[in-house]
Image (cartoon, rainbow, N blue to C red):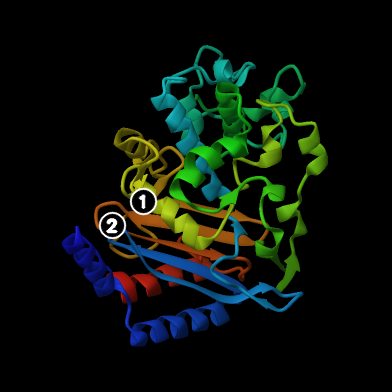
């Protein structure tokens, strides 16, 4: 036992960056932030399943002139979808649902593309954004697609046959959150906390009032070459929650984008996916489920079940993960399950320029961290 501990500590020591590396990383990221007009940036790096680097740069709040710290939490936007999908895979494993189930039966009202009424829209299609559903009627309320509630419900569907085309759709995952509630009888945020966050010993959640508001990072939209505060990012929506209906008003919690978490804790969650469902000695989903989530179902988008692959972030590397963007925030969580490294980069506000579909500060930070901490 002692020998194992010594080997573990020795291995960790080998992966920790030197003082010179730390100084160089800080210099290069700080310069990149200046070049890209970035307000704040939080990063975390995993190498061989160890957290080898975590750091925060810049401002948490412009109004209060507060520095960003590693314990601060962001609304991470669409990376939140992977938490909903992970929860759903747990229920599939428990045989409470199947990926090939008719999604309408799961959500409690008819889900059918009127142009293809005989084609069943499945849970798998919803998870992979191949459902043919769109956000044209909004996605903050399930009334948008419920035929009994919206006379324009047919506009929620494209003219593509379900299962044949990829179209990113937030409504897919807000409905998914409702399905999780219908299958468990438990409010979505409580389910995720009990079955994912708590087992991994990480801090976060979807409900504003369940979290320490002092840790929220202010988010800033970049408009007309200036930054504008986005207070709506952390709106508590207490009135809607007081009239909450399990299995229907779930979009109030935003399964599609409402997770609040730090970069470091998100890196722990990422490590679980990198190790095909297990981290900190705790299995969250099976290897089979993890592989299903990571396997692309659409080309060229390379999107699986709330995780996608890309070779555009770091040259010569194919990485798996997800991005997020909302209220001025940009987040990225990507990993290599074979080489056992991954990175999380989150900014609360940055300039307009991007490369290969990524904000420049995101792409540049990934490459800086990779070159100094992984490639060497």
Q: Is residue 321 above or below residue 141?
A: below
User: What label does residue 137 carry, if any?
Assistant: none
Q: Secondary structure at mark 2?
A: loop
What x and y, as percent, mark residue 334?
Answer: 40, 56
- Name which of mark 1 and mark 2 comes first in the sequence: 1
Residue at (70%, 22%) from the top-left corner?
146
Location of residue 240 by image quarter: top right
Q: Is residue 32 above or below residue 78?
A: below
Location of residue 367 by image quarter: bottom left
Q: Mark 2 sits on what residue?
A: 340
What x and y, as percent, mark residue 14?
Answer: 24, 73
What x and y, as percent, mark residue 92?
Answer: 43, 25
Q: Nearer the viewer, residue 50 or 133?
A: 50
Q: Secondary structure at mark 1?
A: loop
Location of residue 278 by image quarter: top left
Q: Nearer the viewer, residue 158 or 234?
A: 234
- Residue 357 makes an appearance in the image: no
Residue at (80%, 43%) from the top-left corner?
238
Q: Mark 1 sits on what residue?
A: 280
């Amino acid at each position: 036992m002692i020998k194992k501990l010594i080997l573990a500590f020795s291995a960790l020591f080998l992966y920790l960056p030197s003082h010179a590396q730390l100084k160089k990383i800080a210099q290069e990221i700080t310069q990149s932030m200046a070049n890209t007009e970035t307000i704040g940036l939080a990063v975390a790096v995993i190498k061989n399943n160890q957290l080898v680097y975590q750091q925060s740069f810049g401002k948490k709040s412009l109004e209060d002139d507060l520095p960003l710290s590693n314990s601060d939490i962001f609304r991470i936007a669409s990376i939140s979808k992977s938490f909903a999908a992970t929860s759903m895979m747990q229920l599939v494993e428990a045989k409470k649902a199947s990926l090939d189930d008719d999604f309408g039966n799961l959500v409690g009202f008819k889900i059918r593309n009127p142009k293809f009424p005989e084609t069943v829209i499945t849970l798998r299609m919803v998870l992979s954004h191949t459902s043919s559903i769109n956000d044209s009627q909004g996605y903050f309320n399930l009334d948008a697609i419920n035929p009994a509630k919206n006379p324009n419900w047919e506009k929620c569907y494209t003219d593509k046959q379900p299962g044949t085309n990829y179209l990113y759709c937030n409504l897919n995952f807000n409905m998914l959150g409702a399905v999780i509630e219908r299958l468990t009888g438990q409010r979505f945020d409580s389910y995720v906390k009990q079955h994912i966050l708590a087992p991994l010993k990480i801090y976060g959640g979807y409900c504003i009032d369940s979290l320490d508001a002092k840790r929220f990072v202010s988010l800033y939209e970049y408009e007309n070459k200036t930054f504008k505060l986005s207070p709506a990012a952390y709106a508590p929506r207490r009135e809607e929650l007081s009239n909450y209906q399990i299995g229907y008003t779930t979009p109030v919690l935003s399964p599609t984008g409402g997770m609040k978490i730090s970069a470091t804790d998100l890196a722990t969650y990422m490590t679980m996916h990198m190790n095909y469902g297990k981290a900190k000695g705790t299995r969250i989903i099976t290897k089979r489920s993890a592989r299903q989530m990571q396997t692309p179902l659409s080309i060229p988008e390379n999107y699986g079940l709330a995780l996608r692959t890309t070779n555009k972030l770091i040259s010569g590397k194919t990485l798996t993960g997800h991005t997020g963007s909302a209220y001025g925030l940009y987040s990225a969580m990507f990993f290599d399950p074979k080489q056992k490294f991954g990175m999380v980069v989150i900014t609360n506000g940055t300039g307009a320029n991007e490369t290969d579909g990524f904000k420049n500060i995101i792409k540049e930070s990934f490459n800086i961290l990779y070159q100094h901490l992984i490639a060497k």
